[in-house]
Amino acid sequence: MITLSHKRIREVFTEHNVEVPSWYARMALIESFWRNDARRWSIDRRINYRASIDAAVARGDMGNGKMRVEECGRDCDGMEYWGRLHMIWATRSAYLALQDQIGEWADGPFSLYIIPRDEPDPDSGSHDTFAEAAGY
């Protein structure tokens, strides 16, 4: 992470016999360094996310080119669900397409889990949290 202070900028410019920029120019310099660092962090995060999906796909490939993906989540009425299975091709693009497809129609938060090939199918179920809170 790049950390620049006004004092450090002044030292760098003085070391190179360059006129020290105004306060506004120093702020613009700090902002440009911050943006470049944030952009680099964002790219690293995307690369790590893709690598983690690829590793999970490799663990989830059942040998026939398919993998099981479990969907869990909650809809807008407080109904929690888990264990909804999807069989998709064992590729990152298929996983991301499923994520986009579910996200397009989701009424609340959801999670997808690639199930490793040696684990059994998860139990499925649902739970109405609003009804429970109301005492039903």
Image: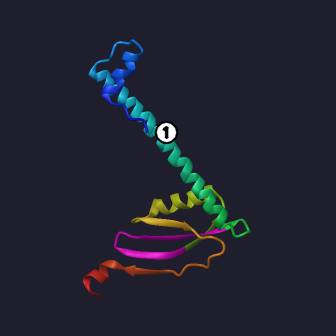
Question: Which residue is the site of mark 1?
Answer: 40
Q: Where is residue 112 in the image (x, y as percent from the top left)?
A: 52, 66
Give above or below for 4 relative to 20: below
Which residue is more in the foreground, 53 or 6?
A: 6
Give above or below for 46 relative to 35: below
Give above or below for 35 relative to 82: above
Q: Tell me the residue at 36%/21% (across/down).
A: 11
Taking the magenta stretch, the answer to whether it contains residue 109 is no
| Residue found at the very far bottom of the displayed protein | 136
- 117 horizontally vs 73: left or right: right
| Residue found at the very far right of the displayed protein | 64
Q: Tell me the residue at 33%/16% (across/down).
A: 20
- 49 horizontally vs 15: left or right: right
Q: Tell me the residue at 58%/52% (across/down).
A: 50
Q: What stretch is highlighted in magenta?
A: 67-84
**What amino acid is at disc 1?**
Arg
State the predominant SS element of the stretch in magenta.
strand
- 56 horizontally vs 109: left or right: right
Image quarter hosting the C terminus: bottom left
Taking the magenta stretch, the answer to whether it contains residue 78 is yes
Which of the 4 image quadrants contains residue 15? Answer: top left
Q: Where is residue 46 in the image (x, y as percent from the top left)?
A: 53, 48
Image quarter hosting the N terminus: top left
